Amino acid sequence: MKKILVTGGAGFIGSHVVRLFAKKYPDYKIVNLDALTYAGNLENLNDVESLSNYSFVKGDITDETFIDQLFAKEHFDAVIHLAAESHVDRSIMDPLSFVKTNILGTAVLLNAARKYWQDMNGKLFYHVSTDEVYGSLGESGFFTETTPYDPHSPYSASKASSDHLVKAYFDTYGLPVVISNCSNNYGSHQFPEKLLPLMINNIVHSKPLPVYGKGDNVRDWLWVEDHARAIDVIFHKGKLGETYNIGGFNEWKNLDIVHLLCKIMDKKLNRAEGESAKLITFVKDRAGHDKRYAIDATKLNKELGWTPSLQFEEGLDKTIDWYLANGEWIENVTSGAYKDYYKDQYVSR
Ligand code: NAD
Ligand code: DAU
């Protein structure tokens, strides 16, 4: 029986990882540690909370005393570390909270693992990271596992630092680690500060659709449940000390993806063709906006046999349907502090 600490399990990707592991592996004990920041939401785990192999602990990964006590008490066999500040625009407004959570928080967890795993045999510290650590691509080429780090935003710089700390604990203390760097995720339960759920929510409410710059930046989109499946494969079969890139070979210009959303949603909302696209509004670009991300996931495919399960159009359709069917969820997460965030970020942009 394995006892696994999942950090950030009440967030978007974390809740999908907790769901997959708790349901697929009834013999594992899953402890979800989350501070429940604006991005953490226990409603994301309604279908998991009654499972006997799942438990939730509220706490902050930057609180060293608390984390040490948790490790001393629980005797974890593995950590899947997802807790983070995750939104690039927020990192531009408030970089220090990203430094604190993403760098210090990761260091606190690594240090607890080092202290409490006297016997490192069979243990694993899995760090869930991002392709943004590699910087930005031109018109062609892909990020591979050997692409040099070149982060540009406070968010990506903090994730790059945390990756380096994870590698340093492997090299220095022999801590058994693995890292994965994934491209842009989409799917159910994503907080509507990120491009797709923000646009879906605004289309529903016929609000302006704020496209940064000319909308010609490119992102590589992966269905969140395929990311969770990749984490499962890497957790069980990945080689210690290695990095695996995760992506769907699925590049889209932002403007094209917003047009596609408008087209699909006009049909679903019984609107005239072209009606939602009239809401598209070009706004001031993001500072330091990375032009293009594209992941080469060949290593993960060749060495561990993972491939994405869904075509993008199918995943997008499922995602839109989920948001349309879960109006209460979106209402709950947008009714409070989100209004101030939205005003600061968009109103005079
Ligand atoms: P999210 O913002 O939806 O969730 C983050 C979770 O971490 C929330 O539940 C939040 O409450 C929790 N958290 C934040 N600070 C904490 C702290 N100090 N202590 C404990 N918990 C804390 O993020 P996400 O999009 O689900 O991303 C999860 C991880 O995956 C992050 O590490 C992110 O860098 C990485 N990632 C995200 C994407 C993406 O497209 N969203 C892609 C690649 C990698
Ligand atoms: O690549 C992986 C990363 O993807 C993750 O590490 C991050 O946690 C995640 O937030 C995401 O970062 P991005 O900055 O790429 O995602 P975001 O959804 O914020 O933006 C996607 C693109 O859309 C980006 O080029 C900026 C643009 N955009 C975004 C918003 C919120 C807009 O044009 N308008 C918007 O309102």
Image: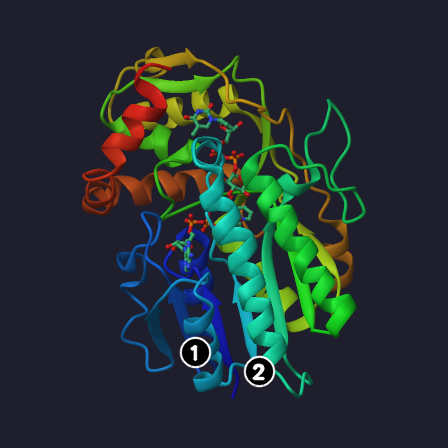
The answer, for residue 307, to whether it is visible in the render is no
Within 10 Å of the Cα at label 1, are there few (<14), some (14-19), or many (20+) other Cα atoms?
A: some
Q: Nearer the viewer, residue 266 or 241?
A: 241
Which residue corresponds to the image point at 62% horizontal and 44% vertical from the top-left?
248
Per the image, the residue denoted by label 1 is 70
Residue positioned 50% across, 19% down in the render = 255
Q: Which residue is mark 2?
A: 116
- Of labels 1 and 2, earlier in sequence is 1
Task: Give me the C-alpha separation between circle 1 and circle 2.
Answer: 10 Å
Quarter where residue 153 is shown: top right
Q: Residue furthest front?
A: 65
In which quadrant will I find the C terminus?
top left
Q: Position of residue 177 (x, y in %)?
A: 68, 68
Q: Which element is circle 2 on?
A: helix
Q: Residue flagged by tag 2: what amino acid is it?
A: Tyr
Above/below status of 233 relative to 268:
below
Q: For numbered disc 1, what is the local secondary structure?
A: helix
User: In this rendering, is residue 7 above or below 65?
Assistant: above
Q: Name the residue nearer the viewer: 297 or 240.
A: 240
Residue 262 located left or right of residue 221: left
Across and down, in percent, residue 230 comes to: 60, 59
Q: Height in image: 136 above or below 166?
A: above
